Image (spheres, coloured by chain):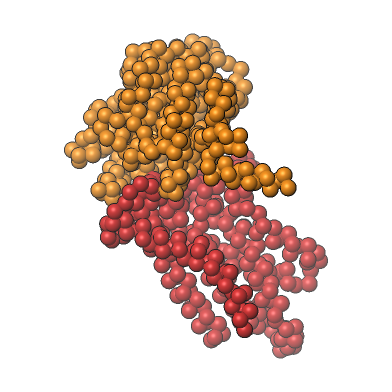
Chain colours: A orange, B red
Amino acid sequence: MPRRTAALVALSLLLTGCGADGRVTLDFFQFKPEATEVFDRIIAGFEREHPGIRVVQNHVPNAETAVRARLVRGDVPDVLALNGSSVFGELARAGVFHDFSRHPAREAINPAVQRILDDLGTHRPGEVNGLPFASNANGIIYNKSLFDAHGVRPPTSWPDLLTAARRFEAAGVTPFYLTLKDAWTALPTFNALAANLAPGDFFARRAAGRTSFGAAYGEVTARLAELYRYGQPDRFSRGYDEGNREFAQGRSAMYLQGSYAIPAIRKAGPRFEIGTFNPHDKLVAGVDVAITMPREPRRPKEAALFVDYLMRPAVLRAYAREQVAVPPLREATPDDPALQGVMPFFAEGRLTGYPDHQIPLAVGLERIIQQFLIDGDRRAFLAELDSEYDKVMERRS
Amino acid sequence: MRTYYWMVLPALVLFLLFHTVPVLQGLYYSFTDYPGYGEHAFVGLRNYLNLVKDDRILDAYLFTFKFALVATVLTNVLALAVALGLNARIRFRTALRGIYFIPNVLAILIVGYIFNYLFANSVPAVFGGTNILADPALAWIGIVLVAVWQAVAFNIVIYLAGLQTIPADLHEAAMIDGAGTWRRFLSVVFPLIAPFFTINMVLSLKNFLQVFDHIVALTNGGPGTSTTSVSLLIYTGGFQGGEYAYQTANAIVYFVVIVLVSLVQLRILQRREATL
């Protein structure tokens, strides 16, 4: 009998969005499995302030596919926390999300970070379809003890980086722990090189057919291949999780991943201090978590209250502290020492978005890069990239 | 009489609801530019025309057929050999039959992840060499090994059932006529289990043409795109790449291809059954 009552209550919750106690239930879609506990605490704080609202956190593996599937069914969550990826831009362009252009929380947000999110795509020009909640820094992670032991300082330029890599190699230390079994793990390096070496208007010109990867990406490709020579021998057989673990064991001096990898590395219990640096002019930064809600919300008032709460600077800072993220605020001051190396780029606004977000996912960029890093054929790589890009664009038009 | 209709009806309704309706829906979307959400418009045959121009689709077809043919032949040769052994008078026959069936009960994804670990760590440690799954030229062999290991179990059961339909006096008569083991297999056993051979060949080829789980667990289509099967391409391009309508067209074409291949195969093998 109690079980049946519970089922009925659950059913009525689903049907009306109201609890038996009269509370309104918000469906909060959250994409980041590592962050469920932090969000649980944030939700608890919100519910204390708003006893009439209950927030249910909904997190699934493969969130981008899942959110698409829910949209197909016309079942849009009340509030969403999504990764600022090309999928986000695609959904925003399709007109699924609310326009936040007049939202008061925007005043505190770092405009350079907001621009990165908007550049992914908006429904109409001038709209703001999401608010940055946490940003990441796509620099290079390094092992401070190994750097000190070999008298190497964090590189600030490309030649510096190569010198450091050679120095470690000569000393018998693996410069980079590479994890090419997971094809995407080469993307951070590709992005940093592409953002700094290819012309700024490349993607606009590429879409118009006035340039090609073959013409503009020669240097990017050459440097990518050069860097990937300094890895361990079984680089094609190791994946991201193994990489985090092995780097934490001190197996390499540097690790070609962004700040988002730091929590996972720390979990493996490293016995050294983690640092970050960026050897390029500009730092590739992304919106790790963006907050948004549907254009036609079912519970507009409650959803807006929750968004307001999430966007409070104190909440942003608390989240960033826990997840080793950079709060997307004008006065960004992350307490985490691991991020000090890349903070000047945020303060000076020397930021740029992820170039791969401009390449349609159907191109399969990561697989093409993986193939290139195995066979080293630069000409074939660029030709393949151009031909896949053209095919996808033609299918879209 | 009416009872029989009632017995068939639930299955028919379920089949129409969960199989035929989605297929028709897919057919409809394959003529649109639907990305999986939001609005869509009719584009006629454009998706189908683009399929022909896409070399990635051709590569996926080539890989899938190469894989399916090799895996089908290996599976059936091995399954038949093991079934002959398990049908003979050997010790622990029942226990061995049970053991050989185990791979069929295990989930492919789990088996795949275990083999993934073995290929990456244990095999190089014991035999030397590198991880074959990390080599674009060799990765498909790893997938064949796992797929065959898993599929043999089920085919053994079918062959065993076939072998048990052969009356013992036929064996005896052949032996009295002086036929050796090999002669008896070719002239007595194989002709009599030919219908089971047909069903095993058709089912294995069809299953291997739809290969998906093995690849997700072992290589995820890589390195590069060297082990991307048609099903995997439909999934990654359609759901992750946002080309739902385009890959749905691909799925419709592939459905037709598999039906045709199965029909042709059935015709040829059944004709052989009659002449044997």
- Exactly how many numbered labels are in the figure? 0
Residue projecting furthest to the right:
B91
Q: Is residue B121 above or below residue A326?
A: below
Q: Which is nearer the eye, A203 or A156?
A: A203
The quadrant where residue A350 appears: top left
Q: Which is nearer the eye, A188 or A95?
A: A95
Can residue B82 be seen by looking at this rendering?
Answer: yes
Where residue B63 appears, as percent x and y from the top left, is 44, 57
Q: Which is nearer the eye, A300 or A242?
A: A300
Q: Residue at x 63, y 79 (%)?
A: B3
Q: Residue at x 78, y 66 (%)?
A: B94
Q: Residue at x 37, y 37 (%)?
A: A295
Where residue A99 appears, as percent x and y from the top left, is 34, 31
Q: Is residue A326 above or below residue B249?
A: above
Please state if A128 lies on the left or on the right of A215 as rendered.
Answer: right
Where residue B6 appears, as percent x and y from the top left, is 60, 75
Q: Which is nearer the eye, A375 or A354?
A: A354
The quadrant where residue A322 appears: top right
Q: Is residue A247 above or below residue B210?
A: above
Residue projecting furthest to the front:
A22
Where residue A31 appears, as percent x and y from the top left, is 49, 35
